[in-house]
Image: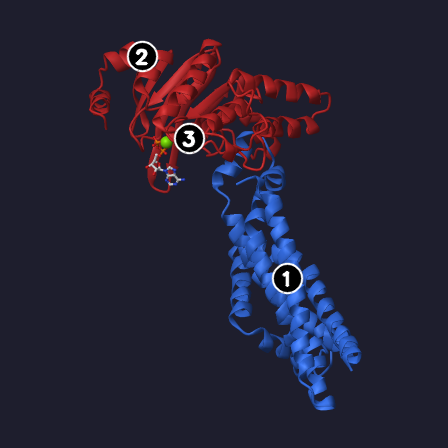
Chain colours: A red, B blue
Amino acid sequence: MAILEVKNLKKSFDDTEVIRDISFTMDEGETLTIIGSSGSGKTTLLRCLNFLERPDSGVIRVKDEVLFDSDITGTVSEKDIRNRRLHFGLVFQSFNLFPQYTALENVTLAPLLLAKENTGIDLPAIEENARGLLDDMGLSDRMGNYPHELSGGQQQRVAIARALALHPDILCFDEPTSALDPELTGEVLRVIKDLAGHNMTMIIVTHEMSFAHDVSDKILFMDKGVIAEEGTPEEVIDNPQNDRTIQFLANYKNGM
Amino acid sequence: MALTVTLTLLEGFLQTIRLFILTLLFALPLGLVISFGSMAKAQAVRVPIRFMIWVIRGTPLMLQLLVIYYGPGIIMKSNVWGSGDTGRFIAALVAFVINYSCYFSEIYRGGIQSIPVGQYEAGQVLGMTKHQIFFKVVLLQVIKRIVPPISNEIITLVKDTSLARVIAVYEIIWKGQSFIKSAGIIWPLFYTGVFYLLFSGLLTLLFGFVEKKLSYFR
Ligand SMILES: Nc1ncnc2c1ncn2[C@@H]1O[C@H](COP(=O)(O)OP(=O)(O)O)[C@@H](O)[C@H]1O
Ligand SMILES: [Mg+2]
């Protein structure tokens, strides 16, 4: 059964339709990559999934739970929204680490706050888990450092650990390496690839085509708010059928 | 003579310090309330508050002191401030609190608005409440950014307290000046400057310390 189902999702800002009727599903453990030119609505789609934007219409379902359905009216409490968005994690292009906290504290902050609301959660276990995650990210010797003492690649890996600490069902990445110097993208992509190897369910927006080809089970090509083409990496990247996809990939190879 | 002058000036300085501390005590929190008002989504709140800030920051504190002290008596035909030294001191305090909370509110607003929206969004996707995001994520960053401008404002306040003399609050300069008439000497006036220098020097050290304490992050 699909872990995520997105149906007829639409989102406009003022008069411009940014997401125009998007539907797709993904299975547990899959890595889904979204490619497409700038302005095609990739970020907006991830933001809708993470409840940073409210879709105008459509349905978002995770496992058996309907997280969003524009046909169901009535208001949702802040607490419900918070619970629903915890199905997802989001790693931002610009990391957005909290500057006043160490790497370790960045990872433990949200789980500790959450634990305060729900009794019966083992506090030492939270720190243990955070240390383990940072260790997996290759940051065992950086746990006590503040974000400004870390390189961009290290900061992004802390951000990934921070998102993982809440055990999201689906982890989203919005161009996780676009803000990095080229020599630092590798370390972040490697970590994401590792997660894919461990069957983390992920949606990745990226412009790194060879990485996308390598890591994805499925690729969506987005164009002007719709999915213009979807399929395996071999289908979409090696044998694109849609004119727009062909053009996009050609621009890409010419080093846009 | 030196002793008499010192004691008299100390008495005036006590009044200066009292005005200074009480102004901060009220204006620092009130400024926060006003800054939230000036950022309110509702126009009915935001517009009048911005207007008030514009008026207060756009007119001299001296004028505000006079209006606040004499205004109620003339308009309402009753002296709301009560008579004597205490009444004048309270009127001065009210004027200072209004004036300084408007200045502080603009500093707070600048500090709050300078926090990148990504900080709020990171908190949101981590399931934090608005309350948690403000207190656990944003607040310390705001404090770090506003310490320098707030310190400037506070050091200005030390010197601005002397304006209270226009409604006969006997602060230190008033006391120093009184020796010109009574004893024909001017040096007590210079002596008051020493008090100001020492006090603002002390504050500069204190704020430098706070800035340093907050320099562990960027
Ligand atoms: N908050 C917003 N208000 C108005 N327009 C927006 C907003 N966010 C995004 N857009 C517009 O939506 C379009 C898609 O943006 P985005 O989802 O960021 O695309 P992508 O991530 O694929 O580059 C762009 O034209 C952008 O200007
Ligand atoms: Mg984008």
Is A42 above or below relative to B202? above
Q: Looking at the image, which residue is at 73% across and 81% down?
A: B78
Q: Quadrant of the C terminus of chain A?
A: top left
* SS type, badge 2: helix
Q: Is residue B186 visible?
A: yes
User: Sequence order check: which comes first, mark 2 or mark 3?
Assistant: 3
Mark 3 Cβ inside 8 Å of ligand 2: yes
Q: Looking at the image, which residue is at 51% across and 29% down?
A: A72
Same chain for mark 1 and mark 3? The answer is: no
* SS type, badge 3: loop
Label 3 crowding class (10 Å Cα cut-off): few <14, some 14-19, many 20+?
some
Amino acid on which disc 3 is placed = Gln
Mark 2 Cβ inside 8 Å of ligand 1: no
Residue A233: numbered disc: 2
User: Residue A159: x percent and y percent?
Assistant: 50, 27
Q: Marks 1 and 3, Cα distance to the nearest angstrom?
A: 45 Å
Residue A62: numbered disc: none
In this picture, residue B70 sits left or right of residue A97: right
User: Outermost residue, front direction?
Assistant: B2
